[in-house]
Structures are given as structure tokens and as C-alpha cells.
Image (spheres, grey):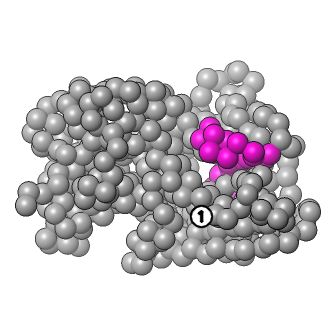
């Protein structure tokens, strides 16, 4: 039986390297790890083989988008996984080429605008017989699966609150930081008290309080509004939502509140974006490592009503230690790649990676990692516990 061939774009990056490592452990997979610099691709492949001498992984030098067609000819992949980022404002050249060549496609996009544009190519992908899933990452793939698990058995979902908090002592790349910075100070949709509203990236700051699932593990860290595909996708999936927000946080307080301060020039139209500052702020974040730890996490809090009208609060948390947090965004793509390779996923078309797997399948991959998850069921919450402190802007 021939190997299932996967070309990983951005394979030497923070997420791409980990994803390539995970794919190379899969029986019957052959991985082509692409990087702009061949030397980096070679080093990453050697590191993967040191951990797994049986891994079928080969380096590829590739500059997007102009070098992509030649890389396809050289590697003849069955699946292309784009982990290159940042996806904010990116063209769809990679996906369009995959559709033209009849190649299945996944990406790790966390950019709301990019996900919207991918979904708009659904008819073209379906006509070409191409499976194209965008957002096969922490959001919206994992987050939507968590929400689905928490919502099981409820007659109505009324509020969803998602937050991701990174560790200060973890690997981060310039592309990863640029993706965060692109949304700082920009308007984003939220739902509050049953009405659509607008928040601004890295504003609406608050501190975790005792009512937050991650408070016991991470303490009173600051988090703020953050853009995410979920802000579009979850209202479509749960039309009765009366509250929806997505937040994110950096562990070091100077970094978090510094971004809050820098968000104002963007919000006021004095700067178009903070993304050009990505290299400098990446170095600054590394310099702040002594102020933090190697522990981060993710939490999802859902409120709804049972068929009998009873109000229920359900929550889930993930805590990553030892700097293992960057593995989390790669595992959904690994799960979906398995489904495509095995033939379990066959429906063509371009769509967001929403509820593509059940939560236990994701949690089963966490065994070797310093990552733990926990579901928390609180069926009779108090109306307001006042556990968190929040800024007005």
C-alpha cells in the first residue's frame, strides 16, 4: 500500500514543526516538511528522525506563493497542510492552486476574514472533488468540538465564553506574534444581552477570577477581547445565543497591558496595524520570560437551558505545562488528516473546520504531553458571582 503523502507548508515554524512530527508518527504517512530555508527544513527533519528513526519525512525548500506549483510537482502530495501563517489578510493562492490540481487542503488559520474567504470557495472545491477545511486548529476546530460536547442535551445554548491564555516561557515565532498583532485595536463582533455589538482587539480587559475555570491553575491573569472565527461561526450554529465573547491573554502583565495601551492608536486610526512591530515585540516577549512560567491554558464556559427550562452552567478547561501549549493547535489538523487518509472524511467542499471530531478523540492525543483537560458541571450557578475585575475599555 502506497504512503499517504502530506506536504506541510511552514513546516519549520512553531506549529508546523510539531504538526510534521505528529504526522510523521502516523503509520503509512510520508511527510514533506517545507520551509523557506532548506537548512532549517533539514534540521527539523533530522530532529524528527532523532525521535522517530522510522519517520518518513523529507525537507523541501519553498517560498510562497511562487514556489508552490514546483513543490507540488516534486512531492506529489495527497494533502497540503498550510501551517505557515499569519493568515490575516493572506491571499487564497495556495487553496486555489490545490483546487486546480485536485489536492485536499487543510490550514491552521485563526483569522476570521481568511476563514470567511475560504468558505466562499465551497462551490469550486466541491466541483473539483477537493476537501478543503480551514481552521483545523485550536480555533475553531477544537473550540467548536468543546462547545458541542458541553451543549449536549441542552434545549437552548444562551451564552458562550472562550479564552486562550499563553505561557510566557514557551516557543513563539514572529508569524505567530504578527497574527495576534494584526487584530489589536481592530473592531470585532460580540453578542451581549441578546444584541450584536462591537469590541476592539485587546481591549475590554479583565482579570481571571474565582468563577473562571482556569483561575485555580493560572491565577488572576489579564485577558482581553480577541478576534476569532468563532465569533462568526458559533452564532450560526447556535442561533439563540444571547452572549458570546472570545478573549486571549499573555502571562506577563507588562506585555498584556502594554498591548492594551498600543491598541488605542489603532482603534483611533492613528496606526493601520501593529503587525509591522512583530519582530521587536517577539524579542520583547522572550525578554519577559523570567516574569512568567511555562503554563498556559484554554477555557470554555457555556450557559444554557435544559428541556425542562433549568439553567445550567457547563465548563471545560485545558492546562498546558512545560511549554507544551503550542502542541494544542496542531492536534486538530492531525485528527482531520487521519480522517482524510483513512477515507472516513469524503465530503468535498470548502468549509470551516467545525465539529470535525469529537472531543474525546482530541483528548486521547494528549497522553505524552504535559497537558490536562477537565470538564466542570455546575448545574445551578448563582446569577452573578462577581469573581472577575473588568476594565471599561
Q: Quadrant of the C terminus?
A: top right
Q: How many labels does the image show?
A: 1
195 above or below 283?
above
Question: Residue sitting at 18 percent across and 60 percent down?
Answer: 29
Which residue is situated farthest in the front direction here? 308
Who is closer to the viewer here, 14 or 196?
196
Q: Report if residue 298 is visible in the image.
A: no
Q: Quadrant of the N terminus?
A: bottom left
Q: Report if residue 6 is visible in the image.
A: yes
Q: What residue sits right under mark 1 in the picture?
A: 149
Question: Residue sitting at 24 percent across and 68 percent down?
Answer: 25
Residue 201 painted magenta:
no
Q: In x, y percent, where is residue 88?
A: 50, 33
Question: Residue sitting at 75 percent across and 24 percent down?
Answer: 268
Q: In x, y percent, where is residue 60?
A: 17, 45
Q: In x, y percent, where is residue 205?
A: 78, 49
Question: Residue sitting at 53 percent across and 70 percent down?
Answer: 320
Q: In this view, does 108 lie to the left or right of 148?
A: left
Q: Tag 1, which secondary structure?
A: helix
| Region rendered in magenta | 232-256
Residue 253 painted magenta:
yes
Who is closer to the viewer here, 41 or 136?
136
Amino acid at each position: 500500500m502506497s504512503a499517504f503523502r502530506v506536504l506541510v507548508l511552514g513546516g519549520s515554524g512553531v506549529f508546523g514543526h510539531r504538526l510534521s512530527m505528529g504526522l510523521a508518527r502516523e503509520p503509512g504517512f510520508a511527510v514533506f516538511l517545507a520551509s523557506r530555508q532548506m537548512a532549517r527544513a533539514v534540521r527539523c527533519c533530522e530532529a524528527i528522525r532523532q525521535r522517530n528513526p522510522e519517520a518518513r519525512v523529507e525537507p523541501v525548500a519553498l517560498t510562497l506563493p511562487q514556489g508552490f506549483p514546483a513543490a507540488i510537482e516534486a512531492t506529489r502530495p495527497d494533502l497540503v497542510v498550510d501551517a505557515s501563517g499569519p493568515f490575516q489578510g493572506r491571499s487564497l493562492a495556495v487553496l486555489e492552486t490545490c483546487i486546480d490540481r485536485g489536492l485536499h487542503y487543510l490550514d491552521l488559520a485563526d483569522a476570521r476574514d481568511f476563514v470567511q474567504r475560504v468558505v466562499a470557495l465551497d462551490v469550486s472545491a466541491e466541483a473539483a472533488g477537493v476537501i478543503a477545511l480551514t481552521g483545523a486548529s485550536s480555533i475553531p476546530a477544537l473550540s467548536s468540538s468543546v462547545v458541542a460536547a458541553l451543549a449536549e442535551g441542552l434545549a437552548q445554548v444562551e451564552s458562550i465564553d472562550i479564552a486562550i491564555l499563553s505561557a510566557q516561557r514557551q516557543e513563539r515565532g514572529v508569524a505567530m506574534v504578527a497574527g495576534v498583532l494584526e487584530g489589536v485595536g481592530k473592531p470585532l463582533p460580540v453578542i451581549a444581552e441578546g444584541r450584536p455589538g462591537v469590541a476592539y482587539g485587546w481591549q475590554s480587559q479583565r482579570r481571571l477570577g474565582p468563577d473562571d475555570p482556569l483561575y485555580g491553575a493560572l491565577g488572576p491573569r489579564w485577558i482581553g477581547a480577541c478576534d476569532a472565527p468563532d465569533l462568526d461561526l458559533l452564532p450560526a450554529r447556535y442561533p439563540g445565543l444571547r452572549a458570546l465573547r472570545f478573549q486571549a491573554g499573555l502571562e506577563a502583565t507588562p506585555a498584556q497591558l502594554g498591548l492594551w495601551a498600543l491598541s488605542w492608536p489603532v482603534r483611533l486610526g492613528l496606526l493601520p496595524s501593529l503587525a509591522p512591530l512583530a519582530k521587536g515585540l517577539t524579542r520583547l516577549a522572550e525578554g519577559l520570560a523570567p516574569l512568567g512560567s511555562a503554563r498556559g491554558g484554554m477555557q470554555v464556559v457555556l450557559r444554557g437551558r435544559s428541556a425542562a427550562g433549568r439553567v445550567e452552567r457547563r465548563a471545560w478547561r485545558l492546562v498546558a505545562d512545560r511549554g507544551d501549549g503550542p502542541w494544542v493547535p496542531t492536534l486538530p489538523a492531525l485528527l482531520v488528516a487521519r480522517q482524510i487518509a483513512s477515507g472516513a472524511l469524503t465530503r468535498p467542499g470548502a468549509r470551516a473546520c467545525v465539529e470535525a471530531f469529537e472531543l474525546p478523540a482530541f483528548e486521547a492525543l494528549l497522553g505524552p504531553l504535559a497537558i490536562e483537560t477537565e470538564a466542570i458541571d455546575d448545574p445551578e450557578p448563582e446569577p452573578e458571582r462577581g469573581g472577575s475585575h473588568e476594565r471599561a475599555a
